[in-house]
Amino acid sequence: MTDKLIELQAVQKAFRSADGAPRTVLEGVDFTLADGEIVALLGKSGSGKSTLLRIVAGLVPADAGKVEYRGRPIRGPLSGVAMVFQSFALFPWLTVQQNVELGLEAQGVPPAVRRERADAMLDLIGLSGFGSALPRELSGGMRQRVGIARALVTHPDVLLMDEAFSALDVLTGETLRGDILDLWDGKRIPTRGILIVSHNIEEAVMMADRIIILSSDPGRVRHEIRIDLPRPRNADAPEVRALVDEVYGLMTMRPAAAPATARPAAIDYRVPDTDVGRMESVLDLLAAAPYDGRADLPQLSEDTELPDEELFPTYEALGLLGLAHVERGDIALTGLGLRYAQADQALRQALFGQQLLKNVPLAARIRRQLEEEPGGALPEDPFIDLLEDTLEADQAKRMLEVAIEWGRYGELYEYDYHTGRLKLPGTGNTKE
């Protein structure tokens, strides 16, 4: 029997944009999950982490490349692979016991055996006595325990976890994560490998034997880190903090082909999905003591109490606008960023608009076309159509929403939500 539970070679996956054009999500991905291993997948938005997980689960087919489970091609869902979702995914009209038994029922396990195995798993996962409860009667942490019990009761070889702790508060997430590791390290579950998708860098370092970092648009394996520290791991231990710093540094490292002075030239450059208020909050925090213009990203994440998936787009946006510089796990204000943090509201908005025109092609395109329009107003639809040439419809809509919010703040243009029209400031209403 092979010691490779999951093996992917040269895997590619593309989805169709609204106009039918393919948009590559994963390209040339090589990946192996070995027997006895926990692997964490990290990557920014657009890296294809969840798509890769669904390919492994047999829920989504790869377009090209090899995808195998124990040496056999994966062509659909497998009895040896189970998945835990971020959203709990419980049937609200079924009891806890019935939810846990669903996978066994699908496998044709007799009712008496289903009940026995479900009871044993509920006891193991800390839900003994809750079998007759409905999901609405449980806390978020307990509902996720039900989701985990439903996956583990089928005795899977491979457990897939897609942001399984992200919907929980920090304390509950840490407790549940620790319980899963206790079951794994104590060999109290038959599972032979765990594959985790996460946005939380500390979570990945605390759990994984290996961390895979994916690049974005399209997703490729960019870095791999092996972790030899024994579990349980102390989050405050110097070696753990050093690993967290290392991963932050790799996550924020620019690709070799994109020097620090590079700026996106394409109109469909994916604008980081963050708001102006969050950007300014980070700038203000950086400019004040004890940071005085420079901070360690893990420490800043802890101080802001914001998750990594919210902070990474903010860091990217600050870098894009020339207000901060991110390198090797640190963030530092530029001279312009320091001036911005010290400015009054009017100057902040003026600087923001100036940097938008200089560095964000979509915002500059909107402004230019409005200036060329005799009435100084245009509907939003042509800009959405333009973005849908290379992005999915929901992504195109969200990208335009972000560009509109940023442009309104920088006073480049105004927007009427009732009519869906953009206009130059001071040109009257936006109606036809």
Image (tube, grey):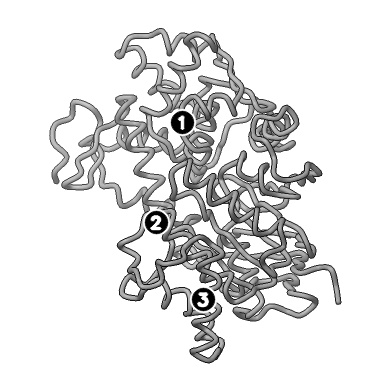
Residue at the spot of label 3: 118
Counting from the top left corner in percent of width and height, residue 395 is at 43, 53
Q: Secondary structure at mark 2?
A: helix
Residue for point 43% across, 43% down: 169
Q: Which residue is mark 2?
A: 394
Which badge, 1 or 2, comes first in the chain's sequence?
1
Furthest residue toward front: 129
Q: Amino acid at mark 1?
A: Glu
- Asked if labels 1 and 3 touch by Cβ distance under 8 angstroms, the answer is no
Left or right: where does residue 169 sit relative to residue 46? left
**Residue 118 point in image, percent of width and height:** 51, 76
Which label sits on residue 305?
Answer: 1
Q: CA distance from mark 2 to mark 3?
A: 39 Å
Earlier residue among tags 2 and 3: 3
Of residues 390 and 57, the one nearer the viewer is 57
Front-most of 386 and 85?
85
Q: Is residue 57 left or right of residue 28?
A: left
Residue at 56%, 67% in the rendered image: 83
**The N terminus lies in which quarter of the figure?**
bottom right
In x, y percent, where is residue 402? 38, 40
Q: Which mark is residue 196?
A: none
Alpha-carbon neighbours of circle 3 within 10 Å: few (<14), some, or many (≥20)?
A: many
Give the foreground label among 3 and 1: 3
Q: Marks 1 and 2: which is nearer the front?
A: 1
Contact, mark 2 vs mark 3 (Cβ under 8 Å): no
Q: Secondary structure at mark 1?
A: loop
Q: What residue is shown at x 56% (from left), y 14% (from top)? A: 334
